[in-house]
Amino acid sequence: MPLAAQRRARRVAAAVIPAAALLATALSSAAPADAAATGSSIAVGHPSWATPQADKGAVPSSTRITARVYLASQDAAGLAAYAQAVSTPSSAQYGKYLSAAQAAAKFGPSAASTAALKSYLAGHGLSVTAATEHYLDISGTAAQVEAAFSTSLHNFATPTGVHHAPTGDLTLPVSVAKGLLSVVGLDGVTNTAARPDSVSVRKAIGTKNTKATKNTATSTPATTVPEPCSTYWGQYTATGFPAGYTAAEPTDPCSYVPSQLRKAYGVAETGLTGKRATIAIVDAYGSSTMLADANQYATNHGDAAFRPGQYTEYVTPANWQLQAACGGADGWAPEEALDVEMAHGYAPNADVVYVGANSCSDQDLLASWQLIVDKHLADVVSNSWGEIMHGPAGYFDTSIIAPYEQVLKLAAVEGIGFNVSSGDCGDNSPGAASTGANCDPNTTEPQTQWPASDPWATAVGGTALAISSASGSYKFETAMGNQRSVLSADGTSWNPFPGYWFFGGGGGTSEDFNQPWYQHFAVPSKLSHTLMTGKSVSTAHRVLPDVAMNGDLLTSVAVGISDGGPYSEAGYGGTSVSSPSFAGILADAIQARHGRPLGFANPALYLREGLYTDVKAHPAATHIGDQTLSVVYDLGYNADGSRKARLYSLGTDYGLNAGRGFDNATGLGSPNAWFLWSFSLGGFGF
């Protein structure tokens, strides 16, 4: 999947809830409506980068301004309370979900409040150019915007250029403000946000050269093909290379296929197939050949193709936008194929719905979430994308958090759960980004990835899975994290050694969200009270990931795709693999519950703390103690006849550590047959 270079995203930093307000609330957004009863007006914060020092003067009054006004729940407190109750197994309301219509009627925006807001905006000359149940798109002059929101618009210098923004908080009368949740877009920053959390092995590591010949002047073995990949861990040992981390380095594992993964994670043992469950996949745009590719992939590997009607999709090519900034439909197609094929692979009888956003912007991706919830399209939703929250001034729009979280709570009320990949850049620090294969170079500090960090989402991290047989018998797992060394030109050494950090699962302690109720007893206090910058805090914070599954680049999965070209398969890694994999696992769990939805699964997941496979940096199953796990990836020969190879260590994430129990690299651990059986066994039937 495309790397960061395909998306040099800029985020809106519009009139928003101040960051301090976001930090003060773990499970309910500091929505403007919540404060409406406390005064005659209500303020929505403005960007932190809109400072007097950066002020370049007023925006001309006739300048055309557009923005999106998100509508608030008519009962924000009630929504949060009900979402928590129906998701918590110990609650009397657990599992008593509402239909989409019931949820909208009880917790959606009030028709009266929306009408009052529309009237107020129109009274100030602003036009509503589009309207849904969730938002109003507005347009008007700078003068009209300033009058409506009691602020001034000025131009401000930022690292990404000069952008306009409010000089102060937006203020509205209480009678109007109670219907407003957030305002996005009152500045000039292009909001192209999300990035796929997957990487092609060919792009990140290279293509094996089977044509070039060896350099006969060296001691390289007389062969013209690279060392073969290993069908199971240690099947082949790399020969003709200098010593690495171990005396006998295994060759890289061959890309896994669904039958192997189902066996490794206990799905095959349980006989579960995801029957009676529906998985939704959200990415940007859409592949024109997704169904055909998924069917070809399944049949190639001994699985059944989708039956008629089992796969559906919602894509609107006529409305696609920002393709240059987002990497285009072709750039996102491998991500879509990966997600659909993994979900189907782990839950072959589950229905799969693909919902393609019209771009990678937060607003368009959120619209896809809203569609799923409004139409109750699925039981579990996989999202293999995300973004950092802390970058240069104007990089992330905190005003988008409240609308996302409102939809997540509505989803919980309906019995829908959202999985989100935790990222491929370790702790997302500048150090990790300096050498990482799938990092955002704009990061300014160690941080968790959003929206995985939101307490109402299930954050899915990564592991490196090793199997002990061609059929997929589980051998061990370690943390998803690789260091890379390159074979020297003369073939006598690995440089550097140990290698530089290259790839790893995301996680850590969020500085933006407090600890949710379901993490109180499982997460070590030291983790929840120590931010990733090293700062100690008195209030416990959200720690992620919640769970983890295979996603390492060196234990990749095969993905099949054509999308206009010849069908082919290639290896992919990343927590993009992990998220749809766990969505498939949850679909299997729903089948074990006789079709009863799990909804927002985190409370039930944490109650099963002792049932996961505890993933550590150096798993005991390798029988090598603390010796570094590593593999050689042989690329064959260069055109000049010199050997081309890479040495990768496994289990070393950047700034994150996998250890006993819950940790910030792999969370609770990875699922297994006992985890799945618990959803049907007496005493674990919640």
Image: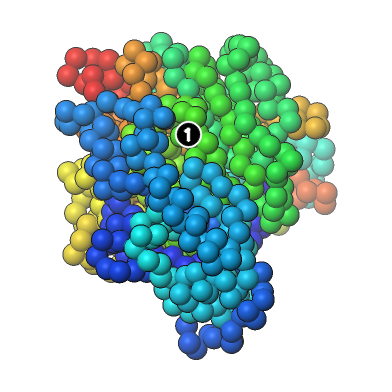
Residue 377, x across and y down, in percent: 50, 27
Give the residue pinned by disc 1: 374
Q: In this rendered view, identify the residue nearer to me: 252 or 4.
A: 4
Quarter occupied by residue 494: bottom right
Q: Mark 1: which amino acid? A: Asp
Q: Residue at x 56, y 26 (%)?
A: 353
Residue 222 visible, this angle: no
Relative height, residue 55 to residue 628 (above, below): below
Q: Quadrant of the N terminus?
A: top right
Quarter occupied by residue 295: top right
Image check: 323 left or right of 280?
right
Residue 515, x across and y down, in percent: 25, 52
Q: Residues within 10 Å of mark 1 (few under 14, many from 20)?
A: many
Q: In this rendered view, identify the residue nearer to me: 477 or 250.
A: 477
Residue 132, x across and y down, in percent: 54, 44
Q: Residue at x 28, y 20 (%)?
A: 679
Relative height, residue 118 to residue 619 (above, below): below
